[in-house]
């Protein structure tokens, strides 16, 4: 059922089998499986996730490569609800372990917000990440290109940069190293650091590859209809490029888990076993939030595994159903 501030009261006494934080690619896959295992689940989705920003899903088996992420998310949300999952638009602020259950505090509504608390036996952390973008005065100018011809994922979109003039945008020296991987797809790479000064060693390495380095701040991206033609820098320099990669790191949506003790991370990525179970036996983690490849195919598979392990645990603890008249 689709929940909202109007009807969520009906669920405040429910103990869900699982609450899925994040209704993107992995979370919706988990919810579809949970619902079809006959388990009660609630998906909480804040809106404007990474998969909705994805303008086209290029590399998923059998899907038209022009298919936007928003279309898949809308369709899968309906699918999950049709199989029996609950879905609520809201932001998960905090998860508290109460022993047998978790208390999941959700902010509902931007104005006059309410803060209902839902309960579940398991939590599936499927809240993903979001890419850091260059901070320009006119952010609309960034959004006009980022995700279209100015990519954020080389595995997804390296193919679409093939032999084009490209920019690699970084904000730390380590992130500049992406240029030496990206050159598999194109060697015509200009490196932009948007104000960061680079060491002599890195300068030498870039020069050795023939990759121009621009340390000046970015003024604006040039082009039209989401098609980049270049980048203008603060000092008026124009760097020609029809594509590029932003490699400035990610923000991890894992704040609500910070109160849970003993969760193991690699950096900000949650560590899990083969079934996506974290070091807390009742918390599972999927997709971009956990260690591994940030791909839709991986997130969807993770959702399948997590839901199946939760079902196995629940079934093993349940009384067998006997054929009784
Ligand atoms: P998401 O799909 O991002 O879902 C997480 C959800 O959690 C989001 O909807 C978010 O709104 C929600 N959320 C976060 N915090 C909270 C909270 N506290 N409370 C409630 N909800 C919350 N992958 C490919 O395989 N192929 C591609 O071609 C491709 N192209 C891409 C292009 C772009 C521009 C981008 C940005 C990504 C692309 N990706 C691609 C990567 C792909 O989008 C991700 O790997 C995939 O969406 C990960 O799934 P997920 O379920 O882990 O996270
Ligand atoms: P396959 O998709 O089986 O591909 C292996 C291919 O290798 C086959 O096409 C085969 O012809 C070929 N092959 C084998 N040997 C050779 C050889 N020596 N030389 C050349 N080719 C060879 N999964 C779900 O997720 N959801 C469902 O609802 C679902 N329902 C199912 C219903 C049915 C009736 C069946 C049979 C399966 C269902 N599955 C479902 C399972 C799903 O089909 C498999 O898990 C999935 O196809 C496995 O992918 P695969 O690539 O490993 O194998």
Image (tube, rainbow, N blue to C red):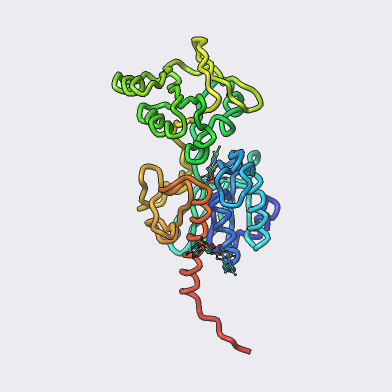
Image-based side of 52 in relation to 125, left or right: right
Answer above or below: position of 43 versus 137. Answer: below
Quadrant of the frame with the C terminus? bottom right
Using the image as rendered, state which of residue 272 and residue 6 is in the foreground: 272
Answer above or below: position of 194 versus 117. Answer: above
Q: Residue furthest left?
A: 201
Residue 113 in sight here: no
Q: Quadrant of residue 118?
A: bottom right
Give me the residue at 47% from left, 65% from top.
309
Residue 202 in percent (x, y) is at 32, 23
Image-based side of 197 in relation to 306, left or right: left
Image-based side of 118 in relation to 274, left or right: right
Give me the residue at 51% from left, 40% from top.
156
Residue 236 in percent (x, y) is at 52, 10
Quadrant of the frame with the N terminus? bottom right
Q: Residue furthest right?
A: 6
State ligand 2's quadrant.
Answer: bottom right
């Amino acid at each position: 059922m689709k929940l909202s501030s109007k009807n969520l009261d009906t669920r405040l006494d429910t103990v869900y089998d699982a609450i899925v934080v994040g209704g993107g690619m992995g979370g919706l896959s988990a919810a579809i499986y949970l619902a079809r295992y006959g388990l009660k689940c609630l998906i909480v989705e804040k809106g404007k996730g990474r998969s909705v920003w994805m303008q086209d899903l290029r590399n998923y088996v059998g899907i038209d490569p022009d298919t936007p992420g928003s279309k898949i998310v809308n369709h899968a949300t309906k699918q999950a609800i049709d199989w029996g999952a609950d879905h609520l638009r809201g932001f998960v602020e905090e998860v508290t372990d109460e022993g047998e259950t978790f208390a999941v505090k959700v902010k509902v509504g931007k104005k006059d917000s309410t803060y209902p608390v839902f309960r579940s036996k398991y939590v599936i952390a499927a809240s993903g990440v979001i890419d850091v973008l260059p901070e320009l005065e006119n952010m609309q100018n960034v959004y006009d290109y980022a995700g279209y011809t100015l990519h954020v994922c080389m595995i997804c979109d390296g193919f679409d940069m093939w032999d084009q003039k490209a920019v690699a945008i970084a904000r730390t020296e380590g992130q500049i190293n992406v240029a030496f991987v990206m050159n598999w797809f194109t060697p015509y790479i200009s490196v932009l650091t948007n104000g960061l000064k680079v060491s002599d060693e890195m300068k030498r390495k870039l020069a050795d590859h023939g990759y121009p380095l621009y340390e000046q701040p970015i003024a604006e991206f040039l082009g039209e209809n989401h098609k980049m033609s270049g980048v203008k820098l603060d000092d008026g320099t124009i760097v020609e490029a029809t594509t590029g990669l932003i490699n400035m790191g990610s923000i991890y949506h894992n704040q609500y888990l910070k109160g849970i003790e003993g969760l193991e991370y690699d950096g900000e990525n949650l560590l899990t076993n083969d079934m996506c179970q974290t070091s807390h036996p009742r918390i599972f983690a999927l997709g971009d939030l956990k260690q591994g490849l940030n791909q839709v195919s991986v997130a969807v598979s993770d959702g399948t595994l997590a839901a199946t392990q939760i079902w196995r645990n629940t079934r093993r603890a349940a009384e067998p159903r006997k054929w009784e008249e």
